[in-house]
Amino acid sequence: METLFDLFTSFNVKASSGSVTLSLLLVFLGLLYWYSVYPFSVLSRYGIKHPKPVPFFGNLFLFREGFFKPLNDLIKTHGRVCGYYLGRKPVVVIADPDLLRQVMVKDFSSFPNRMTLRFATKPMVDCLLALKDERWRRVRSILTPSFSAAKMKEMVPLINTVTEVMMKNLTTHAESGQAFDIHRCFGFFTMDVIASVAFATHVDSQNKPDDPFVHHAQMFFTFSFFRPMMMFFMAFPSLMAPVARFIPNKRRDEMSNFFIHNIQKIIKQREEQPPDQRRRDFLQLMLDARTAKECASLDQFDTSNHGDETLTNPKAASSDQESSRSEESALRRPQKKMMTEDEVVGQAFIFLLAGYETTSSTLGFTCYLLAVHPECQHKVQQEVDQFFSRHESPDYTNIQELKYMDMVVSETLRLYPPGFRFAREVEEDCVVNGVRLPKGATLEIPAGFLHYDPEYWSEPEKFIPERFTPEAKASRHPFVYLPFGSGPRNCVGMRLAQLEIKMALAHLFRRFSVVACSETKVSGDPFSFRDLQGSRSSLNAVGRLVSVTETLNRLPKQDRRKFVLILLENDVFCQKRHNTGKNVVLKAVT
């Protein structure tokens, strides 16, 4: 009897142990399903078409070779409102301009934030791109007056000084007859401008390319991240984001600490100076704004997607602003003033990011396009010659007279947008123009696709500046051209960027002609850089601005070789104008 009792007890214990094991296994499988499969049902539940995701990774593998082409194919296959999974994160792509107007302007209060920068550290976490909600509104309201027309006029002398140095260096190169990299020259130019207007620092990288400021700034653009590791981070963001902050990164820390230390040092120096001796630059404008009596509300934000339209036609951007007031009434109140020191450092840092490589690349692309379209260059030079017959030098007001140059720059920005993707977060479940959007999803705005959309641009691959005549712009939907974004979260520095570009081009084409040489490869698709732009951004999933050479060193070796080959095949020569005697050339790699 005791033996039977012992046997029964033993069986009961084993059965209990088996039940516990089975229960734990079921719980584990349930959690695994919840983590790896269930999130990938969100888009289907909301009726958004998308490619089939892979557990854990979603649709990340679609973008192994870049974002531009796969994203365009996605829209063509699934429609103007479609989606995909960036890891476990649902992304809704909106390529409908009417919907974009609703999201970016009219219903801005429902989509006020950009995509979260999960792996960012200081000073990046304190910059305008990363800030959210009330903190973003406060900082943006302080920065907005810093980019007003009056403040831009104060920056003109600083830009003119740097521009003259570039002209002297170009002349030296022309007279030597030696080949040189004009894109590198533009990079030094924009570096000096940014250092001057943002950091109050006289870097003179055009004459001293080994300056520590230049060295540490370039470290930012040569940061590399192992692609498989990025894939892993995107698949497990909640787990990896805290871990990533503790992974040693000497280059990142050295670069960040250099700028934090130097900006803090400049702030301290400013506070010790008498007010009349303080330099009138971007940093000082921010410091002044901390104690200003009044602060901008969202009513005063320039929400257009083309910075100069509000100068030549004040009504151009008013319609979107008016239409959004009913939605924004709660937001459009004066914001609390004061910026913390971390926020001042963060804005100065992002100013470097947004203004250094993107502006130099636009200058380089403009020179390339005008070299292979000499008839357009001739029109630019005629306009520039007439301009200088009336004015001694360009400034913020008279530069607006260069109408054709503005069209050339606008067309360059259409073909080579500084950022071809923008993102907004969906704060709550909502319906926009009949489209249901899930809470927690990211809205992606494919500016690159819209800039090449044949429905709105005839022969979109071609360089045609006349697309931007006043009549052509008035007849076209404004939300198919988004080089600087649109709405209250557009690029706060777009006016300065355009001013810098146009001043440099006016001086350059007054003195030089850019000519295609025998080595110049004029492709049927002149934007063979575009796919490489996409492949760079696949490593840049946080939604940072992407430009032509910003992330060259992030490319895998085979893509890097291809990219360099493309650069070498697109050599351009710059010939000095009004030169007596021999023809001298500048070899410009764009």
Image (spheres, rainbow, N blue to C red):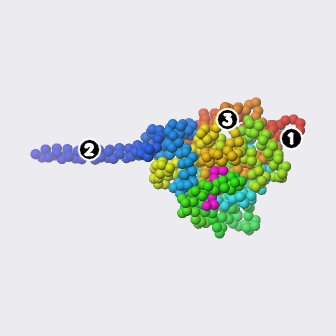
Q: Residue 7: horizontal and vertical position, in percent?
A: 16, 44
The amino acid marked with disc number 2 is Gly
User: 75 or 127, which is in the foreground?
Assistant: 75
> For the residue labelled by badge 3, is the local secondary structure a helix, a strand or a loop?
loop
Q: Residue 422: horizontal and vertical position, in percent?
A: 57, 48
> For the residue labelled by badge 2, is the local secondary structure a helix, a strand or a loop?
helix
User: 378 or 515, which is in the foreground?
Assistant: 378
> For the residue labelled by badge 1, is the local secondary structure a helix, a strand or a loop?
loop
User: 258 or 292, which is in the foreground?
Assistant: 292
Do the residues under discs 1 and 2 have CB atoms within 8 angstroms? no
Q: Residue 296: horizontal and vertical position, in percent?
A: 63, 63
CA–CA distance in space, label 1 to label 2:
92 Å
- Highlighted magenta segment, given as a residue range: 299-307
Disc on the earlier residue, 1 or 2: 2
The residue drawn where x is 50% and y is 39% is 78
Left or right of 231 in this view: 187: right
Answer with the quarter of the image where residue 573 lies.
top right
Residue 18 is tagged as 2
Q: Vertically, is 426 above or below 341?
A: above
